Image (cartoon, grey):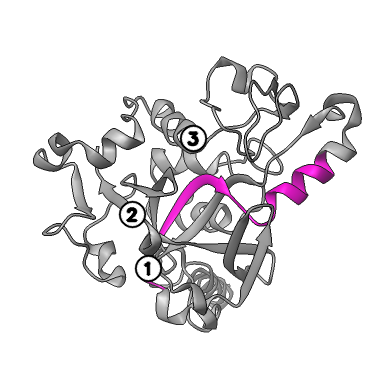
């Protein structure tokens, strides 16, 4: 009996080493609980977060939350939960057609402010103010920015300066906001598991609601499969996803043009998840921002 017990304990310890690699450092956080609840079910980062931290976060929507400009996480966002609300577009833009009906999701700042509200924190300022107001630089909200004298350290050293919940706010044509969630190392990825990303295991990961190479196809199929609820709806090519910052675009094994965007990405989780590169070097202005 004693030998059997020792065997069981040894087996469990070995299994824990496989599930929780020594490099995994992500810790349970209310901010991550909220952020991951709006990504798709069975997402690799959601799975690993739960496994490593013992959390039990469940995705609210099977396919995650799609992007829509102006989606602010207001009463309309969850008024039809567990189904999506719908919204008629008020103007024509490069993505939208006036008077067409879209599935109502979130935009980038709608997502980050929704996360903060879920944990009882105040909302952040407008993205332009977050980047450009000198008051934020003077008060220490800017960890690094585009201005001379405030340069970032190398990407693989940013982890030593950032904490979960810090924001990357950047302008590359339009402004965008993302939340820092750690590194591939923090989520237990190894060079053996993701050899194409072996050099970038310590580069920053962000979660955000933005353009994606797969969301449009996913939600077109979702609409087709649910004609009673969404047969009159359109969707955009964006939603809640995880991206990596700082990897040179030419290192991406996959390049794809979807609608009006070029995407550069790695397929991880046995080819089931596109980890996109968010192109910070091309931005005209940016800041790493701590509330």
Q: Which of the pair 195/8 is nearer the observer?
A: 195
Disc 3 versus disc 1: distance between alpha carbons?
23 Å
* Whether residue 236 is situated above or below residue 253 in the rendered picture: above
Dot 1 or dot 2: first in sequence order is 1
Does the rendering let one see residue 108?
yes
- Residue carrying label 3: 111
> Which numbered disc flags the more N-terminal residue, 3 or 2?
3
Residue beneath the point at 63% across and 70% down:
255
- In this rendering, position of residue 142 left or right of residue 177: left
Looking at the image, which residue is at 59% across and 62% down? 263
Residue 217 drawn in magenta: yes
Name the residue that disc number 2 marks. Answer: 284
**Quadrant of the drawing holding the N terminus:** bottom right
Q: Secondary structure at mark 1?
A: loop
- Report x, y in % for residue 120: 35, 24
Q: Disc 1 or disc 2, which is closer to the eye?
A: 2
Give the side of residue 64 with respect to residue 186, left or right: right
First reached walking from the N terminus: tag 3 or tag 1: 3
- Residue beneath the point at 69% across and 52% down: 259
Q: Which residues are magenta?
A: 201-222
| Image x and y of residue 57, in percent | 55, 42
Between circles 3 and 2, the one closer to the viewer is: 2
Residue pictured at 84% horizontal, 27% vertical = 232
Circle 1 residue:
203
- Indicate the position of residue 170 as horizontal and vertical percent values: 36, 49
């Amino acid at each position: 009996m004693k030998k059997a017990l020792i065997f069981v304990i040894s087996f469990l310890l070995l299994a824990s080493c496989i599930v929780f690699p020594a490099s995994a450092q992500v810790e349970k956080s209310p901010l991550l609980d909220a952020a991951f609840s709006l990504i798709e079910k069975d997402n690799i980062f959601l799975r690993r977060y739960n496994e490593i931290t013992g959390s039990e976060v469940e995705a609210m929507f099977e396919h995650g939350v799609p992007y829509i400009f102006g989606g602010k996480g207001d009463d309309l966002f969850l008024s039809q939960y567990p189904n999506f609300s719908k919204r008629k577009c008020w103007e024509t833009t490069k993505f939208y057609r006036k008077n067409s009906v879209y599935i109502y999701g979130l935009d980038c700042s709608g997502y980050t402010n929704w996360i903060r509200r879920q944990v009882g924190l105040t909302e952040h300022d407008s993205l332009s103010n977050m980047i450009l107001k000198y008051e934020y630089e003077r008060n220490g909200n800017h960890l690094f920015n585009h201005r001379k004298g405030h340069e970032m350290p190398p990407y693989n050293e940013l982890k030593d300066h950032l904490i979960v919940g810090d924001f990357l706010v950047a302008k590359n044509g339009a402004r965008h906001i993302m939340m820092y969630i750690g590194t591939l190392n923090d989520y237990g990825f190894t060079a053996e598991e993701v050899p194409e990303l072996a050099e970038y295991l310590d580069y920053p990961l962000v979660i955000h609601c933005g353009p994606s190479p797969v969301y449009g196809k996913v939600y077109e199929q979702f609409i087709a499969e649910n004609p009673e609820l969404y047969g009159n709806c359109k969707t955009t090519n964006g939603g809640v996803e995880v991206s990596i910052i700082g990897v040179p675009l030419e290192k991406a094994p996959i390049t794809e043009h979807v609608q009006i965007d070029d995407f550069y990405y790695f397929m991880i989780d046995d080819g089931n998840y596109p980890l996109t590169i968010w192109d910070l070097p091309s931005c005209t202005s940016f800041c790493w921002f701590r509330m």
